[in-house]
Amino acid sequence: MRLKLYNSLTRKIEEFKPLNPPKVGIYTCGPTVYDYVTIGNWRTYILGDLLVRTLKYFGYQVDYIMNITDVGHLTGDNLGDASIGEDRMEKAAKREKKTAWDIAKFYTDDFLKGYEKLNLIKPRKFTKATNHIKEQIELVKKIEKRGFTYKTSDGIYFDVKLYEKAGNKYGQLSTLDKRKEGARVAKNPEKKDERDFALWKFSKKDEKRQMEWDSPWGRGFPGWHIECSAMGMKYLGEQFDIHVGGEDLRSTHHSNEIAQSEAATGKKPFVKHWAHGAFLLVDGGRMGKSLGNAYTLYDIEKRGFNPMHLRYFYLTGHYRKQLNFTWKALESAKNAYDNLVNVLRSGKYSQWFLDKSITEEQTEEEAVVFTGIDYDERFKKALMNDLQIPEVLKIMWDLLRETSIKDKEKKELILKWDEILGLNLQRHVGFKISAEIGARSSLPTISETQLPEDILNLSDERMLARKRGDYKKADEIRQTIEAKGFIVRDTTGGTVIEKK
């Protein structure tokens, strides 16, 4: 059995075959750091995380890169043309009366905190657009040398028609070629074709930008699309295996990435496999700041939920299907996650269901006696079929209810599966806290004491503080933990917390 994934480029589920096995290069489009990341954005990053975890689980050597957009993403993207409008970073700077650089740092730091809270595997590198201006300029120069650019009063543009005349296909990921000029945006009289997009934008002569650089064409800043091509090729090569992003990036951003990249390299396929996560709906409709429903992790936490409840909620829907967020749905996810934790803490899995009278009608299939191997095969089959994570959750609950398998074997299987699910279950079954969140050692504490949830959360906060070098904060958290009746010991193998 081989891993099969849906490829947005071919529009079908196909067997995943890396370019240079066992190595796999993955690039995920990260956030534009002008505001707090929404729960819609986080769903996309969960998809990237699941892919990385799955590939590692099956033995691939994954090289994971994620970008952080801190310049060049214009507000016109919401209107259908990412080459017009105001730079989101500059606009946020005016809104908050800070510098654009301060805005970028604040929201990048906040994003990284949320990333850790959701137990997402860190990429080899978070690549910032402003740290790769040189690479973006060099890529535009390559495209220019091959004859696919032209100059207007406001920038250097990619010429789509010339690209097509050279025998290339534009818009493989979308239906951009069928879009009518002026249907969504005002016509730009200097553009040769409404599909053309900016590679480099000129600074306005009557307006001083905070983020601008010299280039062969004049002082300005890079277009939004060019950054991902430049950074993807720098760290993963001119061709790599998987590109991940939200459904909203598919038609324009990713189609333009393909065009400019393959124009620069001479028709060499840029990315072999494209994975797009479907939209997250809110109360059955779209999410938007103007609607007041662009919820963040802070909104989730203010309502008494923790990030693992949200992660579990994401796992209840297949990544290619729209998932509807409601507070009731999140409450259901919280109950399921908390029940799962309680089952694991009980140590008597089948009996827990009997004690709690949590049963299901037994189907003919469920009446058959299964082994741990049977369940593990079911797990792998669901995972390899385009990441059927909702099915994986069902298999996990079926395993817990199974009376013919010993609890010790169930525990081992579920903790093994959690390498994919990322629900941080190890910390609830007796553990030695390691130096990294999400990388708990399977070694238990000496006393096998089950730590309360508030102590677990405090230990996570302390780890984060230590990683940031905020030792004063870490020491304050240590004192809080000890005041609650626990001993904290930092060892060469990690931190151990035990009851006094």
Image (cartoon, rainbow, N blue to C red):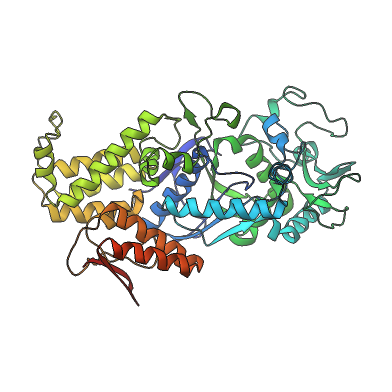
Residue 221 drawn above or below residue 435? above
Q: Give how far across and how far down residue 150 sits, in percent.
A: 86, 43
Q: Does the image show residue 440?
A: no
Q: Is residue 405 left or right of residue 250?
A: left
Q: Give how far across and how far down residue 183 sits, in percent.
A: 73, 22
| Residue nearer the viewer, 227 or 487 | 487
Residue 378 drawn above or below residue 425? above
Q: Residue at the spot x=78%, y=52% of the render?
A: 210
Residue 93 drawn above or below residue 233? above
Q: Is residue 116 left or right of residue 355?
A: right
Q: Does the image show residue 190?
A: yes
Q: Is residue 239 left or right of residue 459?
A: right
Please, which residue is most extreme toward the bottom here? 492
**Residue 402 image-quadrant placement:** top left
Q: Residue at the spot x=8%, y=46% of the render?
A: 404
**Residue 179 image-quadrant placement:** top right
Q: Give how far across and how far down residue 105 sits, in percent.
A: 63, 56
**Residue 207 image-quadrant placement:** top right
| Residue nearer the viewer, 203 or 370 | 203
Q: Residue at the spot x=49%, y=34% of the render?
A: 278
